[in-house]
Image (cartoon, rainbow, N blue to C red):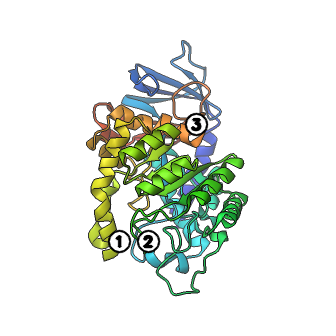
Amino acid sequence: MLMRASALILSQLLAVAAGAETIVVKADRYLDVVAGRHVSPAVVVVEGGRIAAVNPAVLPDGARVVELPGHTLLPGLMDAHVHLNYELAEGWETEPVRFTTGDFALRGVPNARQTLLAGFTTVRDVGTGYGFADVALMHAIDRGWVPGPRVIPAGHALSTTGGHCDITGFAPGIEPPHYLSGVADGVDAVLKAVRYQVKHGAKVIKICATAGVLSFEGPVGAQQYSDAELRAAAEETHRHGLRIAAHAHGTEGIIAASRAGIDSIEHNSIMTEEAARVLKQNGTFVVPNLYLIEAIDVSTLPPALAAKQTFLIPRVSESFRRSLAHGLKVAFGTDAGVFPHGLNAKEFTARVHYGDTPLHAIRSATLVTAELFGTPDRGRIEPGLLADLIAVAGDPLTDIRLLEDVRFVMKGGVIYKQR
């Protein structure tokens, strides 16, 4: 155990030292996600954590050269819907009243590492950061204490009393609802809940607009927050310069959240033609989760929850195809934590299976999600941007499954993985 801990500390020190180097990464090609084509060869010069040059005529003297023959370079991937402090493991139903903030924060450490090594260099953690464990994890990563992606934390998700993001299933008094933990009813309480999350480090706000699957309430998809409450949450979040995401399965909640000015609809499971037109008109992002269709073993869920998931399965894929047909802004999100962390890229394969193209799916996890996050400094391989790079052995436009086996990961000019 001591040797393993020492090795981890040494690897972190070496990674920090490497970040000060000038590095030249050479591969057979890189994917220009804007133009939608490969550029060959790929020579990327990295200095000070940023991309200094792409395919320059002259290379800098004394640079460290990393050769990746047969590989394709891509921008670091982004996931807009993860739960790093959460795992759908035995006993998950009672963890909120058994675990401390420290338990949740420490659980996130290996999950963050697995996510980074899978090629995801920026993620948005949406609403299972009990006690602001997700904010603590963000700080630990930013300070170099542990390896992981850049984290955009939500703190506690906002929920109505007894709603999807409230802790349900316990006797009265065991976990009383309070705006401090995100449970807020009425416009005034919603404003206080938003402000409290922002005060303690949230960089995005999540609100549960509808009922969900992994909660003991129903029916699935029913709108829970009123239009006025949703609008108040969106306006207050934007007043702080942040984005807001709405958990929304059902049609009414999807439409209400979009009309309220919420930036992204998470899950978007039952989106009708009318809802699609509303989202298109408002420029609302959607963050579907297609891999969940096969990732969740409904036989392991309590019967009431299994019934909700079974009801949604065919509607999820139908809504996704409708998103593509209407040209909606489809960001990339997985709900990792409901399935094991590090398997995020299986979402690419699922999306292509349900009608997406490899290029569109990759753009979703780079260009579109960068736009959703409001982070124009990443998502492309261009001079001046963050040196977040990954590589796969082969052409992902031909075989999207290659993204499930990332061979090289660089975040901010630091190499975390090279095979």
Check the image and report above or below for 322 versus 143: above
Give the amino acid type for the residue marked by disc 1 in the picture. Leu
Give the amino acid type for the residue marked by disc 2 in the picture. Ser
Residue 117, position in %: x, y?
46, 48
In which quadrant will I find the C terminus? top left
In this figure, which residue is indicated by the disc labeled 1?
305
Estimate how packed mark 2 is, as few (under 14), some (14 to 19) or many (20 or more) residues with alpha carbons within 10 Å. Answer: many
In this figure, which residue is indicated by the disc labeled 3?
413
Q: Answer whether residue 301 is visible to the viewer in this image.
A: yes
Q: Are marks 1 and 2 in contact (CB under 8 Å)?
A: yes
SS under mark 3: loop
Give the amino acid type for the residue marked by disc 3 in the picture. Gly
The one nearer the camera, 414 or 235, is 235
In this figure, which residue is indicated by the disc labeled 2?
215
C-alpha distance separating marks 1 and 2: 7 Å
Estimate how packed mark 3 is, as few (under 14), some (14 to 19) or many (20 or more) residues with alpha carbons within 10 Å. Answer: many
SS under mark 1: helix
Q: Are marks 3 and 1 in contact (CB under 8 Å)?
A: no
The one nearer the camera, 68 or 355, is 355
Q: Earlier in the sequence, mark 2 or mark 3?
A: 2
